[in-house]
Amino acid sequence: MNEQKTSSYRWVILLMTFLPCFWMSVCQFQATPYAADLMQRLSLAEQQYATIATAPMLVGVFISFLSGTLGDKFGVKKTVAVALVITTIGAVARAFAPSYGMLLLVTILMGVAGTVLNSNNAKLMSTWFSPEQLGLAIGIVVAAGNGGTILAMMIGKGLSPDVSKAFLYGGIMFAVLTVLWILFVKERKVELPEGAEMPKVDLGDVLKSRYTWVAAAGAALFMGVNLSVSALMSPGLVAKGVADGSASLTIVIFSVIALASSILMPGIIAKQSNTKLFCAILAAASGITLYLSWRSSSAIVRDILIAVCAVCLGGLLPTIMSIPALLPEIGPVKMGAAGGLISTVMMAGAFVIPSYVITPIAGGINDTAFLLAAVCAVLLAVIFLILPNASARKR
């Protein structure tokens, strides 16, 4: 194992990457406890508030591929630094937005850093971490989203009863993170065999990579299953007569365990001799337990099953995001563009599958909706059987 991949400084790099993604999630879901305040202050309809709540994710559909390409061309540190400046501007301006249109615009800007980091995460981590630890590193950054959501739910209106002040505090924290990124992040060059020249970044190679597109489809299906829990299950349970607190607890259990799984499971997956079959079993099991959890009339059984679903599902996305590093047509040099392509399709899946596929076909949030979510999980299992073996033993 080379020296750079055993250097203790890799943990500093991991922390500096984790924190902006974590705080992005905190700031995004920071709006939830202030929903009534925002709707009253800016005269927002429920649909308008929903767009504000999801706006930071929307930007990923449009700039993920571009941000990965820029990371390949100009370096991850410079690309992310510019993105953090844009996010800081958006997060601070959010505190002073006087109208729905301006609030929507600055909230979209706020999502830029998270998108750029998500696209370039695997590229940066692959130069600092060994193949055995790469899944763990990517998984920790992926876990930032769930971690930030949980913290935002715990804080509530604790930062300030005034939504503008709470938003301002969030923006100031992004300014601090921007300075820390510039000061402490170091970027490693891709190591090449002696005498070899750095290959040019040809986007055609990325767009023509069959396995990159397959991985992207897997990421979209993952988001379809994941958001069926986080976005559909709670209101669906309440509509079935489950108490608000009990329905919310189910989602909190899922989020906490999915966070832990996204950190711990990638390492377990990487140690398997056949990750294709192992991940396929996990994906199928996540769909089955999700559907059975929805159907259960017992709160205890429902929460146990959703916990199993979270364990099975949590490590799959980091494994998918690490696939480009295994592909000879991609490799470390083009991983930014490949990660951007996967992120683009993934974010599109996050918007389209739950809202425009599952719910309309099912005619609402019902048994059929969660059966369709389970079908998405089975399709994800098929995707893993097609993808290359990601076992660290085989590298």
Image: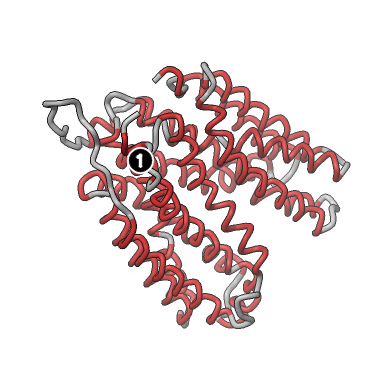
Residue 93 appears left or right of 331 = right
| Up-down relation of residue 19 to residue 160 (above or below) | above
Residue 164's place in the image compared with 126, above or below, is: below
Picture coordinates of residue 271 (x, y %)? 52, 24
User: Can you tell which quarter of the image residue 33 is in?
Assistant: bottom right
Q: Position of residue 258 (x, y in %)?
A: 63, 43
On the image, the x and y values in percent for residue 102 come to: 43, 75
Q: Indicate the quadrant where residue 224 lies.
A: top right
Q: Residue at x 44, y 36 (%)?
A: 321
Q: Secondary structure under badge 1? A: loop
Residue type, mark 1 in image: Trp
Would residue 342 appear left or right of 157 to someone viewing this image?
left
Residue in view at x 42 percent, y 33 percent: 322
Q: Residues within 10 Å of mark 1 (few under 14, many from 20)?
A: many
The residue that mark 1 highlights is: 128
Residue at screen point 50% across, 72% down: 170
Q: Nearest the camera: 295 or 272?
A: 272
